[in-house]
Amino acid sequence: MYNGIINIYKEAGFTSHDVVAKLRGILKQKKIGHTGTLDPEAVGVLPVCLGKGTKVCDLLTDKDKVYETVMRLGVVTDTQDMTGRILKESPVSVSGEALEAVLEQFRGDYSQIPPMYSALKVQGKKLYELAREGQVVERKPRRVQIFDLELLEFEADGIHVHMRVHCSKGTYIRTLCHDIGGKLGCGAAMEKLTRIQVGVFKIEDALTLAEVEKYVQNRQIDSVIRSIDSMFAMWPAGRVDAAADRLLYNGNMFYRKDLILEEKREPVSGEKFRVYDSQGRFCAVYVYDGRRRMFKNEKMFV
């Protein structure tokens, strides 16, 4: 069984679940999970967790994301993108200066109402299922962060706007386009979406499903699977001595003296560590309790 994370380039026409289903066939294993949905017509980075790597799915879902999008001015749709039913069309007369002034209003913290066509659940039912039944339910605004909103191009037609968005988890780019259009007074919908980065995973390193299949055929697939412990490279590492291996495998607490740190220093209370067994195999993330001089398990990967 393969364990780790693979950076997939999701192509248009596939859902995130489609990608997982196809990878199960290519890799011949069931334990696979994705790290957050992309709309079927969107393309780009989709980290997929394999085997024991599925335990980091929630960690990757929480990561910041970077998108490039094309927004079309002068149109409002029920899905907030151009795949939906057009509700309203308006003439567009927006200058570059006016556009930039509105974009500035969305940089930083931003209160966003999730779209009806989304996978969020209300009373156990997904919003898009309710939307397809013609229902519209109240959705509470959610605080999201737009770390950077860059205007890449405002096409000569005065309608198409190219932007790069660096945002927090849970941000809907469709809704961002819709809200920008509302502020401009002409309406807007998302026309294209490409996810170019999720945490450390970048689009230039992403593989299509066909490319993954070739790596499998050439028996080189291990070379493109990122190890689980690399996701925690920001934290220091330590190795237990052989006498503490059993404690580690069972997820038990162990004493400071049982862990040999890579860095020749004393740990700080509350500090997290990548913990390896006496043979150098990554097993878990532990947190140090300085008062008790013990390490406590936070997440196991064995």
Image (cartoon, helix red, strand yellow):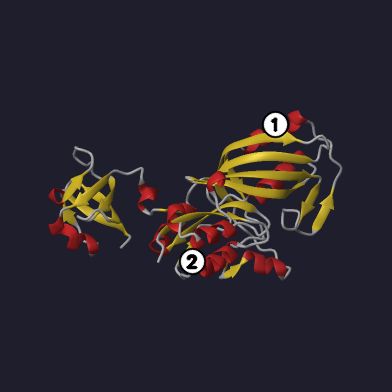
10 Å crowding of disc 2: few (<14), some (14-19), many (20+): some
Position of residue 74 in the picture relative to residue 9 (left or right): right
Residue 179 in picture, x, y percent from top left: 69, 45
Q: Which residue is mark 2?
A: 27
Q: Quadrant of residue 54?
A: bottom left
| Residue at the limit of the structure toward the top, as seen here | 97
Tell me the number on the disc at residue 163: none
Q: Give the answer, above or below, for where 74 lies relative to 134.
A: above
Which type of secondary structure does the marked residue at label 2 adopt?
helix
Which image quarter is the N terminus in?
A: bottom left
Which type of secondary structure does the marked residue at label 1 adopt?
helix
Please indicate, yes or no, whether residue 298 appears anywhere in the rendered image.
yes
Residue 37 in picture, x, y percent from top left: 57, 58
Residue at the image position 73 percent from the left and 53 percent from the top: 81
Residue at the image position 84 percent from the left and 40 percent from the top: 92
Residue 260 in picture, x, y percent from top left: 18, 46
Q: Give the answer, above or below, for where 130 lies relative to 253.
A: below
Residue at the image position 30 percent from the left and 63 percent from the top: 302
Please indicate, yes or no, whether residue 34 appears anywhere in the rendered image.
no
Front: mark 1 or 2 = 2
Position of residue 143 in the picture relative to residue 96 (left or right): left
Q: Which residue is mark 1?
A: 101
Residue 288 in picture, x, y percent from top left: 23, 48
Amino acid bearing label 1: Ala
Q: Quadrant of residue 42?
A: bottom right
Position of residue 179 in the picture relative to residue 206 (left or right): right
Q: Earlier in the sequence, mark 1 or mark 2?
A: 2
Amino acid bearing label 2: Leu
Q: CA distance from mark 1 to mark 2?
A: 49 Å
